Image (cartoon, rainbow, N blue to C red):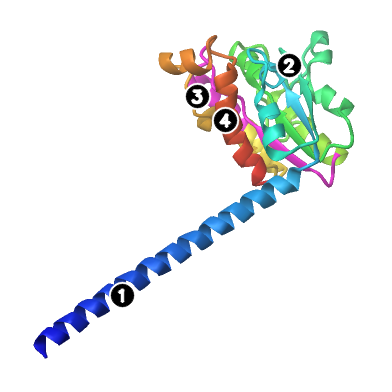
């Protein structure tokens, strides 16, 4: 009788372990199914849609034949991603030469039928401000000759141009010639301006996964200390894709 009780106890313990394992497996399978469904839904959301991507040389694709936005186009099924990147582009307009490169002017000429508009610019502006060529200004500025003013002009203008569409902002990547101490105030100002209009921001300056001050990362992802290579754009695409899926 004693042996039977021990066997029954062991059997009950084994049964409980099996049931627990089945429960955990079922829960994990359910979670995996939900994650897969969510992933499919986020991809379906952008399938066949059009996007306008405006910015500087990084958006243009300097240093690669496969910019990050083109990787995202394939992954998320966009029918078209229009590249409005221009090397040397700025957000601000200070002088006559900026007329063809300033996002504060160029955004008005983008196609009207985009479902998603992404602004990824600022490196050239910040370099100029660090050099003392123009000022940050204040959060209430509306002129295109200050950093805040140009950001406000672009963000408010895009909302008026695309009132029912998704608009997103991406901060510049970090780069070698500007220290974090120098660039951070301007990055924060860009984020503050975007948030003033409730626009979502992806902070690649702090979260790109690429460090231009590390020689190994420079060799692998950013050979000139500024422009990502193909591997760099692939790494950026991973971050940006996650961001776009969540919009």
**Of the two numbered discs 3 and 2 in the rendering, the one whose residue sits closer to the viewer:** 3
Residue 185 visible to an observer of this rendering:
no
Q: Earlier in the sequence, mark 1 or mark 2?
A: 1
Give the residue number, with chain letter if any, for mark 2.
89
How crowded pointer 1 is (Cα within 10 Å; few <14, some 14-19, many 20+) is rated as few
Residue at image position (50%, 60%) is 29
| Mark 3, secondary structure of its residue | loop
Q: State whether residue 98 appears in this view.
A: yes
Q: CA distance from mark 2 to mark 4?
A: 18 Å
Q: Which residue in the structure is indicated by mark 3?
A: 210
- Nearer-N-terminus badge (4/3): 4
Q: Secondary structure at mark 2?
A: loop
Front position in the image: 182 or 224? 224
Whole-angstrom CA distance, mark 3 to mark 1, is 48 Å
> Which of the numbered marks, if any, corresponds to residue 16?
1
Q: Tell me where residue 224 sits by quadrant.
A: top right
Residue 51, numbered circle: none
- The span shown in magenta is 162-189
Mark 1 and mark 4: span between their CA atoms? 48 Å
Q: Is residue 214 left or right of residue 69?
A: left
Separation of disc 4 and disc 3 at Cα? 9 Å
**Nearer the observer, 73 or 114:** 73
Asked if residue 160 is positioned above or below residue 174 in the image, the reply reads: below
* Figure quadrant of the N terminus: bottom left
Q: Residues within 10 Å of mark 3 (few under 14, many from 20)?
A: many
Q: Is residue 90 above or below residue 142?
A: above
């Amino acid at each position: 009788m004693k042996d039977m009780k021990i066997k029954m106890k062991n059997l009950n313990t084994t049964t409980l372990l099996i049931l627990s394992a089945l429960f955990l497996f079922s829960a994990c399978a359910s979670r995996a199914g939900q994650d897969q469904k969510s992933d499919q839904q986020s991809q379906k959301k952008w399938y066949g849609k059009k996007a306008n991507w405006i910015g500087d040389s990084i958006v243009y694709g300097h240093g690669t034949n496969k910019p990050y936005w083109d990787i995202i186009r394939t992954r998320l099924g966009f029918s078209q991603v229009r590249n409005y990147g221009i090397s040397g582009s700025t957000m601000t307009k200070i002088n006559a030469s900026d007329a063809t490169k300033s996002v504060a002017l160029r955004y008005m000429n983008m196609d009207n039928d985009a479902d998603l508009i992404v602004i990824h610019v600022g490196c050239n502006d910040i370099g100029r401000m660090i050099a003392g060529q123009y000022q940050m200004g204040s959060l209430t500025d509306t002129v295109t000759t200050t950093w805040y003013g140009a950001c406000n002009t672009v963000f408010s203008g895009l909302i008026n141009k695309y009132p029912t569409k998704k608009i997103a902002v991406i901060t510049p990547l970090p780069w070698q010639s500007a220290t974090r101490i120098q660039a951070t105030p301007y990055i924060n100002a860009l984020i503050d301006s975007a948030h003033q209009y409730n626009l979502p921001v992806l902070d690649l300056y702090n979260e790109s996964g690429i460090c231009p001050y590390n020689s190994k990362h420079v060799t692998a992802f950013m050979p000139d200390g500024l422009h990502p290579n193909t591997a760099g754009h692939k790494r950026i695409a991973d971050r940006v894709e996650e961001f776009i899926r969540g919009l």
